[in-house]
Amino acid sequence: MSARDVAGKLRRLLFVVPYVAKHPDGVAVEDLAKKLGVDRDEMLADLELLTQVGPPDGDPGEYLLVSVEDGRVFIDLAHRLTRPLRLTPAEGCSLLLGIRALRGSGIAPFDASMESAERKLLGALGRDAGEAETLATGTVVSEPDQVVAGHLRRLVTAARRHVTVEIDYVSASRHQAAHRRVDPYGIVHHAGEWYVVGHCHNRGDVRTFRIDRIAALVDTTERFKPPADFDLEAYRRERLYVPSADAVTVRVHLEPLAVTRIGANWPVGEVTTEDDGSAEILIDCEGFEWVTGWVLGLGRHAWIVGPDEARAAMRERIARVRAALPAV
């Protein structure tokens, strides 16, 4: 074989390996031969040569696994030949903080696995591991107290096993615990707080409960089937609101008729319903224009309980409306 023939074969082999490897369904031998300008027999001879590729002290096939099945060529690359994951120090720091936050939260039952993952991450970072470790060390991740951590562990397990739980829940607008029966769909960490999202049997709808407000938690023997169309991440984006530092929490009382008018169109906020059909909602507002207009639209069946500046804004809004009315 001439040097020119050897060079041509080498070029073909260097092309074939990555080309076929990126086609998980394989490539027809005839198509490959046509693409490279050789006949079928020569193409098969090239593939036979590839089957012998391996380290000097190893076995053929240790780098590449080449097979021809039903007239199609398949090539699987060994893990060592795939492109390694490369992380910047900042990306490594983010992953380290995530692992350490989970370990500190007490909700993950895989401590040994997370320790192993942390070691592998630092190993994969190589010479950047020191910088990532320095960044992570300079960042504080708060840990929940032991009661919250205990609730988190049990709720994670209940959500994973689809087990109904009973809780005593103290809402922000009440000072006594209300007993709830809940099917936990999942756990969300949002704006620095842990929440369990699930179907509340008492209210007949999906509700969000802040875990540090759960006074008591009991597992039941009842199992539930979560709805197939429920998307926890979509729920978090659409229903959980992160107020700005300037936001003010406004408490609104709603009589039963106002609750009926609202129907399913509740604004984002924490709702507490009473046995008589009335409700209170806590709404985080960055100004009072919207909330005063919303309450005004519900007529005399809703009013702002507090704070005082929100009540003053409501009085001003009513005065503006009255001033705009035509004289009789």
Image (cartoon, helix red, strand yellow):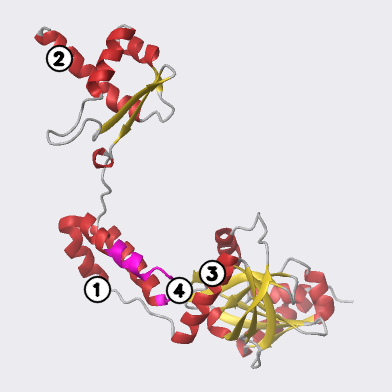
Q: Residues within 10 Å of mark 2 (few under 14, many from 20)?
A: few
Q: CA distance from mark 3 to mark 2?
A: 60 Å
Percent x, y of residue 270 = 64, 77
Q: Amino acid at mark 1?
A: Thr
Q: CA distance from mark 4 to mark 3?
A: 10 Å
Q: Which residue is most to the bottom? A: 175
Numbered disc 1: secondary structure: helix
N-terminal of the two: label 1 or label 4?
4
Residue 324 visible: no
Q: Earlier in the sequence, mark 3 or mark 2?
A: 2
Which amino acid does the dot numbered 4 rest on?
Ile
Label 3: which secondary element: strand
Determine if the magenta segment contains residue 108.
yes
Q: Nearer the viewer, residue 293 or 115?
A: 115
Q: CA distance from mark 1 to mark 2?
A: 54 Å
Q: Nearer the viewer, mark 1 or mark 2?
A: 2
What residue span does the magenta drawing correspond to?
A: 105-118
Classify mark 4: residues with Cα within 10 Å, few (<14), some (14-19) or many (20+).
many
Q: At x 30% / y 67%, what residue is drawn? A: 115
Q: In front of the other: label 1 or label 4? A: 4
Disc on res. 137? 1
Q: Are marks 4 and 3 in contact (CB under 8 Å)?
A: yes
Whether residues under marks 3 and 1 lie with C-beta atoms below 8 angstroms apart, the answer is no
Residue at 80% over, 76% down = 258
Residue appearing at x 27%, y 31% in the figure: 64
Residue 266, given in percent of the width and then of the height, sits at 71, 69
Give the number of the disc on residue 7: 2
Q: Where residue 210 sits: x, y (%)?
A: 56, 78
Residue assigned mark 3:
187
Mark earlier in primary sequence (4, 2):
2
Position of the C terminus, as image quadrant, is bottom right
